[in-house]
């Protein structure tokens, strides 16, 4: 059964570890992440972007697939199904479809509008027992070939949004989505510490977990980060393993073209990446 992410993240913050959010794209991704979480006895959050939801055929498909896997694969660790960077409209769609958690990304709105919409969505989510994440300070990343450096959130604005009753908060601290550029300045721990001091017990979320050095991840966890989003890294390891299989000509040997064989190395690669992250984040054995 799916659960909201509130309890698992409260426990993580209190226990000084973080729960990974791993974004899913299809059955292989979802099964690999769920099985790894179960094997390691770790709580887990499955992230679904609007684009990935559309790709998989719609939110009802996603909810059906995830619930089916949890049942048929005997997954007993806490699993949250979370809309990643949701728009106002899509938060409602996912709540209707059976997601157990949503993120409202109102970071591109002026702060007053972000506050107003967040407040409304918090009430709607909590009414259904769904957890909700909000974002303050936009998280950088590549857009039209230009890599944004990722701005740092204003700690007072973070407190303003946290006080609306959101369950966990994403604050920009110089992190970006996708691969980090060579001249990246690193995470702003000064900002993170200031945000934590203003928001108290609120679990904080670190987006763009791919490529942040392990020591920075560990330090961020000590400063209140309880959820870390991983997306690109699974994509890179899946692609590399698939490339290796094809370059070795294995798809041309016997029944090597069978999709269940063709996609198996990528599946194993995702499992290995998820395991590595759960170990780094400290969530192993915390289910
Ligand atoms: Zn993000």
Image (tube, grey):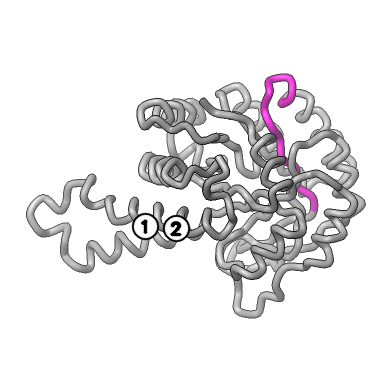
| 286 left or right, relative to 271 | right
Q: Residue at coordinates 37% horizontally, 39% vertically from top-left?
A: 27
Residue assigned mark 1: 269
Residues rendered magenta in the picture: 125-136
Give the answer, above or below, for where 231 lies relative to 245.
above
Q: In the drawing, what numbered circle is on residue 213?
A: none
Question: At numbered mark 1, what does the secondary structure look like: helix, strand or loop?
Answer: helix
How far from the left and from the top, in percent, is residue 276?
Answer: 48, 59
Q: Residue at coordinates 70% horizontally, 72% vertically from top-left?
A: 186
Residue assigned mark 2: 273
Gap in angstroms between the C-alphas marked 1 and 2: 6 Å
Q: Residue at coordinates 23% horizontally, 52% vertically from top-left?
A: 262
Give the answer, above or below, for where 65 lies relative to 38.
above
Give the answer, above or below, for where 247 lies relative to 100.
below
Quarter of the view holding residue 131? top right
Name, please, the residue furthest toward the bottom: 183
């Amino acid at each position: 059964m799916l659960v909201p992410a509130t309890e698992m993240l409260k426990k993580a913050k209190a226990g000084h570890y973080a729960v990974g959010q791993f974004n899913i794209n299809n059955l292989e991704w979802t099964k690999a992440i769920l099985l790894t979480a179960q094997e390691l006895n770790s709580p887990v959050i499955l992230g679904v972007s609007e684009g990935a939801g559309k790709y998989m055929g719609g939110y009802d498909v996603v909810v059906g697939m995830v619930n089916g896997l949890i049942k048929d694969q005997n997954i007993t660790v806490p699993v949250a199904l979370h809309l990643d960077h949701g728009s106002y409209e899509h938060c409602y769609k996912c709540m209707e479809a059976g997601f157990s958690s949503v993120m409202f990304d109102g970071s591109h709105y002026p702060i007053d509008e972000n506050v107003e919409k967040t407040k409304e969505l918090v009430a709607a989510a909590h009414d259904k027992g769904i957890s909700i994440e909000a974002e303050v300070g936009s998280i950088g990343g590549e857009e039209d070939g230009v890599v944004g450096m990722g701005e740092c959130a204003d700690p007072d604005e973070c407190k303003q949004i946290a006080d609306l009753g959101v369950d966990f908060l994403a604050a920009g601290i110089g992190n970006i989505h996708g691969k980090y550029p060579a001249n990246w300045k690193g995470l702003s721990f000064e900002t993170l510490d200031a945000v934590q001091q203003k928001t108290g017990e609120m679990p904080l979320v670190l987006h763009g977990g791919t490529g942040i050095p392990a020591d920075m991840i560990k330090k961020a966890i000590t400063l209140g980060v309880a959820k870390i989003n991983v997306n690109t890294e699974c994509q890179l390891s899946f692609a590399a393993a698939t490339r290796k299989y094809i370059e070795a000509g294995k798809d041309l040997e016997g029944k090597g073209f069978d999709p269940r064989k063709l996609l198996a190395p990528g599946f194993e690669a995702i499992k290995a990446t998820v395991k590595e992250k759960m170990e780094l984040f400290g969530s192993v054995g915390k289910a």
